[in-house]
Image (cartoon, rainbow, N blue to C red):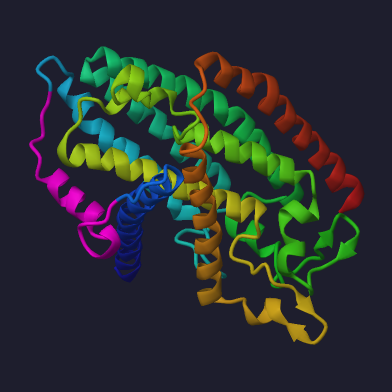
C-alpha cells in the first residue's frame, strides 16, 4: 500500500511541477518577447505583472466548454488529455539528482521516446475530431513534422547511447561526474572521473556529440512545434492550427502540454549531453569544487538551471527567427540533419571501439 501512495505522491508532484512551470513559462515568454520587441510585457496584475498568467489561467478554466456541432465528440474530448498525458508520463524516467528518479528503467530513454510519440496521436485526434479545415491542416502538418524530425533526433540520441552503452537515464547521468564508477576519458585520452566538472560531460568526452546535441536541439524545436518550426500553428494561415476549436480547460491542457514538452526535451538534452545533475565545476588540486557541489539538493539545482537555460534559448529563438516554409523545414530535416545525425552515430561506433 505504501508503494502505491509513494507513486501517487510522485504523480501529484510531477503534475504540480508541470502546472507551475507552465505558469512560469508563459510569464517568462511574455517578458522575453517584450524585451526583444522593446516593450514592457505584463506589468499591472501583481508586482511586475507576476500574477497576470495566473489571472489568465483562472479566467480560462471558467470559460464554457464548447464542442462544435459537427465535431466527433469522443475524439474531440479525448485529444487534450492524451496530448498532455503523453508528455507528462515522459517525466517518469527522468533523473533529477543522484538516486532521485521516479522510475529507474533499464530502457528509460526508449520508454521516453516511445511514450512522448503518443502526443502525435492526440494532435491528429484533435485536428480530425474538430471537423475544421484549419484544425485538420494544422494536425496534418504537425504529424508530418514530428514524425520527420524524430528520425534525426533518434539518431542523435543513439549516438549518446553508443558511447554510454546504456539506455538507463540514471546510468548515463552517473557516467558524467565524480560519482562515476568507471574511468571517464576527456577527448578519449585523459581520465577525468576524479576531476569531474564540465570535462566529464558527454559533449567533452566525445566532442562529436556537440554536433549531435545541436541536431537534437533543433529537432526538439520541431517536435515541440516551436518557432521557427511553428508551421502547424501558423496564426497568419491556420488561426491556431489543431487547437483552433478548443476552449476552457481543454485549451489549457494543450498549453500545459506544450510548455511541459519544452522542459522535457530540454531536460533530455541536459541528461544526455550536458552532464545531467552533475556540476560544471571541476576538482582542482585540493579544491574539490565538483565534490562539494554534488548531492541531491545540488543535483536538482543543476538540472533545473541547465534545463531552464535551454528553455530560455527556445524562447529567444521563437521571438528572433522567422517561420520556415514547409519545403524549407523538410529540406533541413532530410538533407541536413538526418545525414549529419547518421554520421554522428557512425563516429560514436568508431569512438567507442578505439578510444574508450
User: Is residue 281 positioned above or below 140 on the image?
Assistant: below
Q: Is 350 or 20 nearer to us in this picture?
A: 20
Question: Which portion, as a residue range, is magenta?
Answer: 42-67
Residue 110 position, x and y percent, is 56, 42
Q: Position of residue 312 (x, y in %)?
A: 49, 51
Tell me the quarter of the picture where residue 121 sits. Answer: top left
Residue 106 among those drawn in magenta: no
Q: Which residue is drawn at 24% across and 25% down?
A: 244
- Residue nearest the observer in this picture, 314 or 190: 314
Q: In which quarter of the image is the C terminus?
A: bottom right
Q: Is there any visible trace of residue 138 in the rendered image?
A: yes
Above or below: residue 52 compared with residue 228 = below
Residue appearing at x 76%, y 49% in the figure:
163
Say if 70 sits above or below 56 in the image.
Answer: above
**Lateral position of residue 170 relative to residue 9, left or right:** right
Identify the residue at horizontal 82%, vertical 68% (top origin).
192
Q: Is residue 46 magenta?
A: yes
As drawn, the residue found furthest toward the front would be 38
210 displayed left or right of 30: right
Q: Would residue 127 be found to the left or right of residue 209 on screen?
A: left
Figure quadrant of the N terminus: bottom left
Q: Nearer the viewer, residue 86 or 221?
A: 221
Amino acid at each position: 500500500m505504501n508503494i502505491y501512495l509513494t507513486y501517487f505522491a510522485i504523480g501529484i508532484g510531477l503534475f504540480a511541477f508541470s502546472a507551475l512551470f507552465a505558469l512560469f513559462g508563459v510569464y517568462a515568454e511574455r517578458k522575453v518577447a517584450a524585451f526583444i520587441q522593446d516593450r514592457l510585457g505584463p506589468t499591472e496584475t501583481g508586482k511586475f505583472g507576476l500574477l497576470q498568467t495566473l489571472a489568465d489561467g483562472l479566467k480560462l478554466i471558467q470559460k464554457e466548454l464548447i464542442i462544435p456541432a459537427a465535431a466527433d465528440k469522443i475524439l474531440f474530448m479525448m485529444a487534450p488529455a492524451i496530448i498532455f498525458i503523453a508528455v507528462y508520463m515522459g517525466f517518469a524516467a527522468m533523473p533529477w539528482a543522484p538516486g532521485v528518479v521516479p522510475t529507474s528503467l533499464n530502457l528509460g530513454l526508449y520508454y521516453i521516446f516511445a511514450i512522448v510519440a503518443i502526443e502525435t496521436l492526440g494532435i491528429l485526434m484533435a485536428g480530425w475530431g474538430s471537423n475544421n479545415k484549419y484544425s485538420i491542416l494544422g494536425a496534418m502538418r504537425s504529424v508530418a513534422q514530428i514524425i520527420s524530425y524524430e528520425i534525426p533526433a533518434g539518431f542523435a540520441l543513439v549516438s549518446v547511447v553508443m558511447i554510454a552503452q546504456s539506455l538507463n537515464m540514471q546510468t548515463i547521468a552517473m557516467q558524467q561526474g565524480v560519482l562515476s564508477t568507471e574511468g571517464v576519458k576527456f577527448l578519449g585520452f585523459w581520465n577525468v572521473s576524479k576531476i569531474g566538472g564540465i570535462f566529464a560531460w558527454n559533449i567533452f568526452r566525445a566532442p562529436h556529440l556537440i554536433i549531435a546535441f545541436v541536431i537534437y536541439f533543433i529537432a526538439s524545436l520541431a517536435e515541440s512545434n516551436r518557432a521557427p518550426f511553428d508551421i502547424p500553428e501558423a496564426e497568419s494561415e491556420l488561426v491556431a492550427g489543431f487547437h483552433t476549436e478548443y476552449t476552457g480547460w481543454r485549451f489549457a491542457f494543450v498549453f500545459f502540454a506544450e510548455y511541459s514538452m519544452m522542459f522535457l526535451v530540454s531536460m533530455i538534452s541536459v541528461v544526455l549531453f550536458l552532464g545531467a545533475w552533475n556540476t560544471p565545476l571541476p576538482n582542482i588540486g585540493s579544491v574539490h569544487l565538483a565534490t562539494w557541489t554534488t548531492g541531491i539538493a545540488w543535483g536538482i539545482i543543476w538540472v533545473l538551471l541547465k534545463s531552464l537555460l535551454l528553455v530560455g534559448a527556445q524562447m529567444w529563438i521563437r521571438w528572433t527567427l522567422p517561420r520556415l516554409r514547409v519545403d524549407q523545414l523538410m529540406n533541413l530535416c532530410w538533407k541536413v540533419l538526418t545525414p549529419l545525425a547518421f554520421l554522428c552515430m557512425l563516429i560514436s561506433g568508431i569512438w567507442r571501439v578505439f578510444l574508450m
